[in-house]
Image (spheres, grey):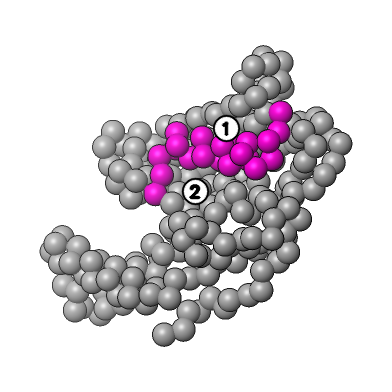
């Protein structure tokens, strides 16, 4: 069965000619979209997930043969593949494909990046905003790639604390800047729909490196800039 995702030619990298993941999955990116090579056995994966959803529906007492649920297992399986597509992408390769040499050495900040992820404990959504900043040290990256890195890590089963650190580390590893700062503010449905059921609770996490960690003035400037 052919994938609905068309394979496309790799876009030449400004830094690296190799955009293959260790697993053999291709990952390249232009200014508008990140391209994903779907595994050849994707239809088998969808079939297995569909069967698992059917079992869960039966487990909660539903009739999987009724009209409204006939296509639900397949819809849920495809939805989960989309919501976890970050496993098929390498965020560091996305950054490497858009590196440029520049002498700019002040803070670069992209704030209010929408995030949608799923808590790995209950597989319920959490969503909010990410603010990402770095201080270049000879290299800058295309601004959209900062948002792409957030998206790749968010489209995996996550905890917010790890998500924040992974974004910081990917940018630090590739750009090797003078520092990186990441703050995420999110609402967790596992705290709203179940459990303590606190509707207005917001969780804030931060991860800093370099000057954002060692310089109080740099950290302070970043935190002031991301205020509403």
Mark 1–mark 2 Cα distance, whole angstroms, equals: 14 Å
Is any atom of residue 125 visible in this view? Answer: no
Give the position of the C terminus as an image quadrant.
top right
Mark 2 lies on residue = 154
In magenta, the rendered stretch is: 157-178
In the picture, residue 74 is in which quadrant? bottom left
Q: Position of residue 105 (x, y in %)?
A: 82, 31
Q: Position of residue 217 (x, y in %)?
A: 71, 15
Give the position of the N terminus as an image quadrant.
bottom left
Q: Which residue does the image show at 28% across and 33% down from the upper left?
A: 196
Q: Which residue does the image show at 68% across and 51% down from the upper left?
A: 96
The answer to whether 113 appears left or right of 202 in the picture is: right
Q: Where is residue 224 in the image (x, y as percent from the top left)?
A: 69, 23
Q: Residue 169 versus residue 131: which sits nearer the camera?
A: 169
Above or below for 110 versus 44: above
Above or below for 8 versus 106: below
In the picture, residue 212 is in which quadrant? top right
Q: Position of residue 71 (x, y in %)?
A: 31, 77
């Amino acid at each position: 069965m052919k994938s609905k995702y068309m394979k496309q030619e790799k876009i030449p990298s400004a830094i690296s000619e190799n955009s293959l993941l260790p697993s053999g999955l291709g990952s390249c990116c232009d200014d508008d979209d990140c391209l994903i090579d779907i595994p050849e056995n994707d239809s088998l994966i969808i079939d297995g997930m569909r069967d698992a959803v059917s079992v869960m529906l039966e487990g909660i007492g539903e009739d999987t043969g009724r009209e409204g649920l006939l296509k639900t297992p397949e819809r849920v399986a495809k939805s989960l593949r989309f919501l976890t597509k970050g496993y098929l992408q390498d965020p560091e390769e996305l950054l490497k494909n858009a590196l440029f040499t520049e002498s700019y050495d002040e803070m670069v900040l992209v704030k209010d990046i929408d995030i949608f992820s799923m808590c790995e404990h209950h597989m319920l959504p959490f969503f909010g905003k990410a603010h990402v900043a770095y201080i270049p040290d000879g290299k800058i990256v295309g601004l959209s790639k900062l948002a792409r890195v957030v998206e790749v890590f968010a489209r995996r089963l996550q905890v917010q604390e790890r998500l924040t650190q992974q974004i910081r580390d990917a940018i630090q590893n590739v750009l090797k800047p003078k520092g990186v700062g990441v703050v995420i503010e999110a609402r967790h449905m596992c705290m709203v729909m179940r459990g303590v059921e606190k509707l207005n609770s917001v969780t804030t996490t931060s991860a800093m490196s370099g000057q954002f960690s060692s310089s109080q003035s740099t950290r302070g400037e970043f935190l002031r800039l991301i205020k509403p």
